[in-house]
Image (tube, rainbow, N blue to C red):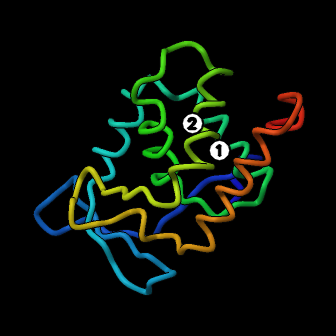
Amino acid sequence: MKYKGLDVDLVPGRIQKGYKNYHSLYKSKADTWTQTNIHKHIDIVKNSDRLDEIRAIKIWRKLNDLDFPSIYLELTVIEALRFGLKGQIAKNLVQVFEYLSKDFTSAIVYDPANSANRISDDLNRIEKGLIAKNASETLNQTSWNYVIW
């Protein structure tokens, strides 16, 4: 949704009775609920030292009109850069696009707050393939102006 000119992700959820940090979130594609800890997700992303890369990939996602849920995207960027150097955004983005184009479709991503949740199941093979295809095409661009601006 748009709020004060910004795109904001909203996920219907409710606090688990007796647990202030655990929530049941509605997954519209699967028409089901899942339990997770949003605060843990926020802490993992905030402490990842990958916020610039995550923001850039979110811009790329928007520009390419890709269905790529935020927590799935964030955990994927963090994993793609597990051995990447900090502060080298351009180099790191190339590394993320390489990961997306080669390893993403087969990678299994679990919810760090609930290992029963396979976040990678939130997208089907075709949706993952579209992300991989766009990442591969992005690697062939000659300038960042064609990628995130």
Q: Residue 106: image x %, image y %?
A: 46, 60
Q: Which mark is residue 86?
A: none
> Which residue occupies the foreground of this view, 107 or 70?
107
Q: Quadrant of the C terminus?
A: top right
- Residue extending farthest to the front is 102
**35 is higher (above) or lower (below) than 45:** below
Task: Establish if 137 lies above or below 18.
Answer: above
- Amino acid type of the residue that numbered disc 1 sits on in the rendered structure: Lys
- Residue at left 33%, top 65%? 118
Judge from the rendering whether residue 97 lies leftward or rightward of residue 48; answer left or right. Answer: right
Write down the residue under mark 2.
Answer: 54
Circle 1: element type: helix
Give the residue number, with chain letter if any, for mark 1. Answer: 58
Q: Residue at x 59, y 31 (%)?
A: 95
**Residue at the extreme top:** 87
CB under 8 Å between discs 1 and 2: yes
Give x and y (percent) for residue 136.
Answer: 72, 48
User: Which one is nearer the viewer's eye here, 146 or 23?
Assistant: 146
**Residue most toward the bottom?**
31
Q: Position of residue 53 (x, y in %)?
A: 59, 30
Residue drawn where x is 61% and y is 39% of the image: 98
Q: Amino acid at mark 2?
A: Ile
Give the secondary structure at mark 2: helix
Residue drawn at (37%, 84%) of the image: 32
Q: Nearer the viewer, residue 84 or 73?
A: 84
